[in-house]
Amino acid sequence: LRARRGMAPFTQCMSPAHMRGLNVPDVLKKDFICNGPAETESRTCVTQVTVCPPSCSCNNNIVDCRRKGLAEIPANLPEGIVEIRLEQNQIKSVPAGAFTAYKKLKRIDLSKNQISDIAADAFSGLRSLTSLVLYGNKITELPKGIFDGLVSLQLLLLNANKINCLRVNAFQDLQNLNLLSLYDNKMQTISKGLFTPLRSIKTLHLAQNPFMCDCHLKWLADYLFDNPIETSGARCSHPRRLANKRISQVKGKKFRCTGQEDYRSRLSGECFQDLVCPEKCRCEGTVVDCSNLKLTRLPPHIPEHTTDLRLNDNEIAILEATGTFKKLPNLRKINLSNNKLRDVREGAFDGASGVLELLLTVNKLTGLQGRMFKGLSGLKTLMLRSNQISCIDNSTFTGLSSG
């Protein structure tokens, strides 16, 4: 550089510290020295993208990391890989851009891990990908756009997860998909149009899902009748009159919605968190049944669409003013019978103006305090039999003018 000063006029030293900022051509030859560990450092540049993970094997552009106890997806894999096998590890998440650098990938196998979280752009840019295997994980929801751009995908295995909802445009770019497995998940309904983009689909697996066969699932019965590609024998779980009936064989007039009971399935394509049933409870339409669970308080995250809340046969002793009913604008009936209820705090029913029926039978109430039922302005039926009531305050029923 001393001989060709015009070639790199701003080339400067970064280290060691006492030489930082000096122009390289101005440094004397005697000052270019190595001390200690620096003398042993390699001077060859190793391209990281050619590194095979220590515990894996890499042959013929296939990275095999099966059963290696991995907790995360290895980075800096060989750039030209066409297949990566990561099944049977302990991976819990797939981060953003996890595979984006490997444009030649044709197959990814992440089956039998512990995956519950996948970034929306985890598979972004993989236009050559033909097989994506995600079965046997803990996935509950797929982020918006996760499969966008996977135009070559032919096989998608999502079975044996906990998926409760699929956005209506989830498969919009998968026109070459041949096989889709959603077997053994938690889906109660599927939005009309979900499978429309799948112009090449030949095999569909939908069985072992708790399908609610109401008016919003009629389209699926029609679709499967016209396209007999569902080979796993998908059946209705609810309502009871259609339980265990094969969806493709149920007549269209049997798929009915009553009143507000279609809320849950009508919004399925949006994947609202509201569609998830409280833990251990049972949800059918807009009925949330949390009876016989030994509950000592109201369960959290009761869906907004709930019209009938069944809390009977539990161990609730005090009904606190938690604001729960302010979040349930569609609620019409509350069943708290057969608990251990001895006190209802003022404000416990705030926001429950739409409730028409309240059952408090077979509890341990000894007195009805003033304003105990505040907030129940629309109440028509109040059942209090089989308690130990000896005192009723003059203002107890103030505001209950609808009965």
Image (cartoon, rainbow, N blue to C red):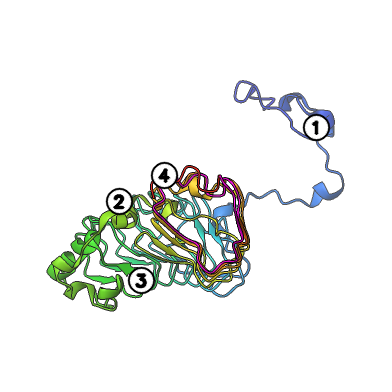
Badge 3 amino acid: Asn
Q: Secondary structure at mark 4?
A: loop
Question: Where residue 130 appears, x then y in whole percent?
Answer: 33, 63
| Mark nearer the viewer, 2 or 3 | 3
| Mark nearer the viewer, 3 or 1 | 3
Chain-order first, disc 3 or disc 1 = 1
Q: Quadrant of residue 11?
A: top right
Residue assigned mark 4: 401
Badge 1 amino acid: Lys
Residue assigned mark 2: 169
Residue assigned mark 3: 209
Chain-order first, disc 2 or disc 3 = 2
Question: Where residue 287 appears, x then y in whole percent?
Answer: 39, 62
Residues packed near mark 2 inside 10 Å, few (<14), some (14 to 19) or many (20 plus): some
Front residue (pair 256, 25): 256
Name the main secondary structure of what is drawn in magenta. loop
- Labelled disc at residue 29: 1
